[in-house]
Image: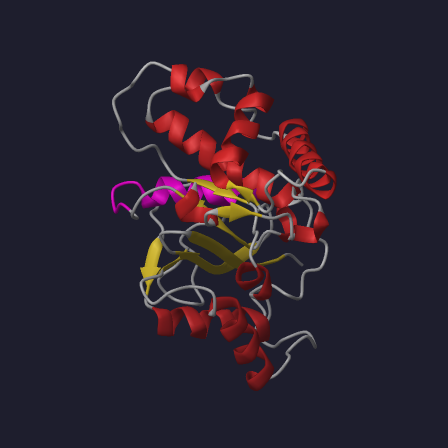
Amino acid sequence: MRSRFGAELDIEDQGSGRLLAHAALGTTEWVLESFGHKEILPSRSRPDTAESLAAEHRRKEQEWYHDDDARWPLPVTDYVTLIESVLGVDFEALPEGQWRPALARFGAPTTELMVGGIRAQTDFGYNDPDSWLIQHRIGGPIDDDTVDLEIDRFIDHWDWERHTPTRWHEVDRGEAVVRLIYVQRESLLFSRNQGWDPGEKLARMRADDFLYPFPKATRFFTNSRARDSYSFRITPYTLDTGVIAFSEEMAGIWWRAEDD
């Protein structure tokens, strides 16, 4: 957890710690599943668990206000203790299982960099995946054998899914930018746009903002080989396309869907 969130944990995310709790529980889920302990995973939706963990974190901050010996920001090791208390589990007492990395999980955005990439969204909430266009990717290096399953798990946050066995199509960063501009300026249904075209300059600025948090090693995926073709759809609308961005520690989506 220290590698994901640093050595100490404050509650900067909207002052509540709920986003941090969601991402931390996702990390906990991945580690437990990787060691074969699926039976004690917190609920996938976990709003109550995240709320309880955030409340315990805020309580520790209040203790710091009145106790000179209390530590703040809270060390990661102490935060893990809070997770144990909320889940009712002693991690040290768990039987040692064989390490077999599970499929990656995804958690709420918690850093200024991640939030900055989607700054047009202002309605962040710990249980509001509609606004989590960039999330923590919690797992190991991207595996070519499982990346399709991971993307499917990622888009499942929005109740989207592939309805055909066609694989996700990988594109390079340059083509990803072109497609991000395309979905802002062009209609998927009509031969001309319907008045929403922001112009080349603004569309590129938005695409650059979205991609800025992602490192050079980021991989990009879409649902078609050509911008005007559709190998599969993930929404119930007539047509949809966009870009999925995957790095070792982040995942992002920019998608457009249209009906008539």
Report how many numbered discs are placed on residues in the image.
0
Task: Assign the N terminus to one quadrant of the image.
Answer: top left
Give the image's coloring scheme: secondary structure
* 218 left or right, relative to 45: left
Q: Quadrant of the C terminus?
A: bottom right
In this view of the protein, which residue sits in the foreground, 219 or 191? Answer: 219
Which residue is at a point 25% across and 22% down the rendered structure image? 98
Give 64 or 77, whichever is nearer the viewer. Answer: 64
Find residue 70 and report its horizontal and vertical position in percent: 62, 38
Query: Which residue appears at 47% of the width and 65% of the height?
Result: 213
Highlighted magenta segment, given as a residue range: 143-162
Magenta stretch, main secondary structure, is helix
Q: Taking 61 as reference, is 243 left or right? A: left
Question: Is 189 on the left-hand or right-hand side of 145?
Answer: right
Q: Position of residue 241 (x, y in %)?
A: 50, 59
Q: Identify the residue at horizontal 58%, vertical 72% (top origin).
A: 184
Q: Position of residue 4 (x, y in %)?
A: 43, 47
Viewer-nearest residue: 14 or 41: 14
Whether 133 is among the magenta residues is no
Vertical arrangement, residue 239 with respect to residue 162, above or below: below
In the figure, residue 174 lies in which quadrant? bottom left
In the displayed structure, 260 sits above or below 135; it is below
